[in-house]
Image (tube, rainbow, N blue to C red):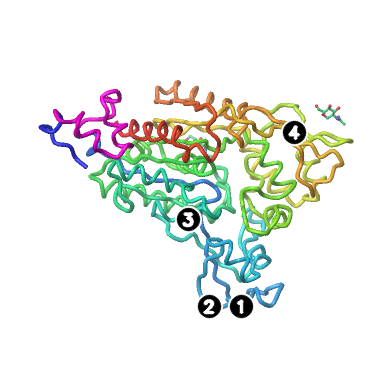
């Protein structure tokens, strides 16, 4: 929506007629965001959604041997949604099949993960800012839906100026030089999408906006490109509560007692645990010893585990299979933080009770632990977020590249892009990233 200059005199009056979000950005108090041309000089945006948002489709070939006969019902029938509609899985008694078909296999020779034999997978709707969805009944504002609507009020359009880069949640970005078939393909597609978005918009540079795991992916993507490419195509990164490479306690809990980030009706976290542990993403973002030090993260009657004790801990969990990929693919990552080296805004909630230590008094990991809380955004521990942000700041400062860390009191990890108060700040920063 363009406001022509003669109309500017009428602006105060017109503002009262505008829908409130736009009014907020154009109102005199925020005149720095407003004005004619500002919205027209819009840079395309690519959204990297949070962990629970991306969908996966599967195709079963002749090589697939189902462990239960009805899991083979869709064999040879083409692509079908594997994770889009949780109730569908329940209604068709498909949960055990879902777990089997979602599971990955770690290949120690290739040092990479692949699907089980006869299972092919793909992430649908790549490119669309609505190409993913929350799987919880009634949570219709999550997964950027509400944020996208606000961007549309500012003139953004899906497929035109607004895009999305959903990913396969089971995989994890590799270290430089390490294989990941899935990520090689994904990063190639994101690169094409960035170039497409830029070309479609008069070669304007692109703003990458990532939430949570998606923030981490956006950052890893940028790091996989050359500085020359970044300078040419990336205008700004907006990282919203990104998963820090320095880790979070929640990851340990998910590994021990099953994922709280995959929510299926009538299914417990424990029931999803065997599947979860096959994912490359399950061992990513373990709390880093360089930040969490020798504070016990897991407390049991007979033995505590710190971030230095993961090999003992994985063994105690009965998950020694996780040791090799952890040592090869994850541990070296914990020691390094590579700043995006493009202008970056980092927003995060603080002042929310966040599990910091997990108490399994009886040493039984099959029950949900008792939490000892610290500060953070409800998921990400403050100590980790600060270590990450400080390091990004330091690296950017050294190269004189813009970096801004914005703490939002009481914004929760997923609420930060849903609740009106924090969303207003997030949108203002996305508008600012257009300058
Ligand atoms: C990130 O970029 C830096 C500088 O180009 C490079 O040294 C490093 O290997 C990259 N890291 C990753 C994870 O790709
Ligand atoms: C484990 O850590 C807790 C809390 O720091 C401490 O009170 C307890 O004595 C430790 N237990 C063992 C077995 O070291």
Q: Cβ–Cβ below 8 Å for labels 1 and 2?
A: yes
Residue at 66% x, 76% y is: 70
> Image height check: is 324 above or below 96?
above
Tell me how far mark 4 sits from mark 2, CA to CA.
46 Å
The residue that label 2 is drawn on is 77
**Sequence order check: which comes first, mark 4 or mark 2?**
2
Bounds of the magenta segment: 9-36
The quarter holding residue 177 reads top right
The residue that label 1 is drawn on is 73
Which mark is on residue 53?
A: none
Tell me how far mark 3 sits from mark 2, CA to CA.
25 Å
Crowd class of label 3 (few under 14; some 14 to 19; many from 20; radius 10 Å): few
- Find ligand 2 in the image and state its quadrant: top right
The quarter holding residue 13 reads top left
- SS label for mark 1: loop
Please, what is the dominant secondary structure of the magenta stretch? Answer: helix
- Whether the residue under disc 1 has CB within 8 Å of ligand 1: no
The residue that label 4 is drawn on is 297
- SS label for mark 4: loop
The residue that label 3 is drawn on is 185
Seen from the viewer's position, the closer of residues 71 and 20 is 20
């Amino acid at each position: 929506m363009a406001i022509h200059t003669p109309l500017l005199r009428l602006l105060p009056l017109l503002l009262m007629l505008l829908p409130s979000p736009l009014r907020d950005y154009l109102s005199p108090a925020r005149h720095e965001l407003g004005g004619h041309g500002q919205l027209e000089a819009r840079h395309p945006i690519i959204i990297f959604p949070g962990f629970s948002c991306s969908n996966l489709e599967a195709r079963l070939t002749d090589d697939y041997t189902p462990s239960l006969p009805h899991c083979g019902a869709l064999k040879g029938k083409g692509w079908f949604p594997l994770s889009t509609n949780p109730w569908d899985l329940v209604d068709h008694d498909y949960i055990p099949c879902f777990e089997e078909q979602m599971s990955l296999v770690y290949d120690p020779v290739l040092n990479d993960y692949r699907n089980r034999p006869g299972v092919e997978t793909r992430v649908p709707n790549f490119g669309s800012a609505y190409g993913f969805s929350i799987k919880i009944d009634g949570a219709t504002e999550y997964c950027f839906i509400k944020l996208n609507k606000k961007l549309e009020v500012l003139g953004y359009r899906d497929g035109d100026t607004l895009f999305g880069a959903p990913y396969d949640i089971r995989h994890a970005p590799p270290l430089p030089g390490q294989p990941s078939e899935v990520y090689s393909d994904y990063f190639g597609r994101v690169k094409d999408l960035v170039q497409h978005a830029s070309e479609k918009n008069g070669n304007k540079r692109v703003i990458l906006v990532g939430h949570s795991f998606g923030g981490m992916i956006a950052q890893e993507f940028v790091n996989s490109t050359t500085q020359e490419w970044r300078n040419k195509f990336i205008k700004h990164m907006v990282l919203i509560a990104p998963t820090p490479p320095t880790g979070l306690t929640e990851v340990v809990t998910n590994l021990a007692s099953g994922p709280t980030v995959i929510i299926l009706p009538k299914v417990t976290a424990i029931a999803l645990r065997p599947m979860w542990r096959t994912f490359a993403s399950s061992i990513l973002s373990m709390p880093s010893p360089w930040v969490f030090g020798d504070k016990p993260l897991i407390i049991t009657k007979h033995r505590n585990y710190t971030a230095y004790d993961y090999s003992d801990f994985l063994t105690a969990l009965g998950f020694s299979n996780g040791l090799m990929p952890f040592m090869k693919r994850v541990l070296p990552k914990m020691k390094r933080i590579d700043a995006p080296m493009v202008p970056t805004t980092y927003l995060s909630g603080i002042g929310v009770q966040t599990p910091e230590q997990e108490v399994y008094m009886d040493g039984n990991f099959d029950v949900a632990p008792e939490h000892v809380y610290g500060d953070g955004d409800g998921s990400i521990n403050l100590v980790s977020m600060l270590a990450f942000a400080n390091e990004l700041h330091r690296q950017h400062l050294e190269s004189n590249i813009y970096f801004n860390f914005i703490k939002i009191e009481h914004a929760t990890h997923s609420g930060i892009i849903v609740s009106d108060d924090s969303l207003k700040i997030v949108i203002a920063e996305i508008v600012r990233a257009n300058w």
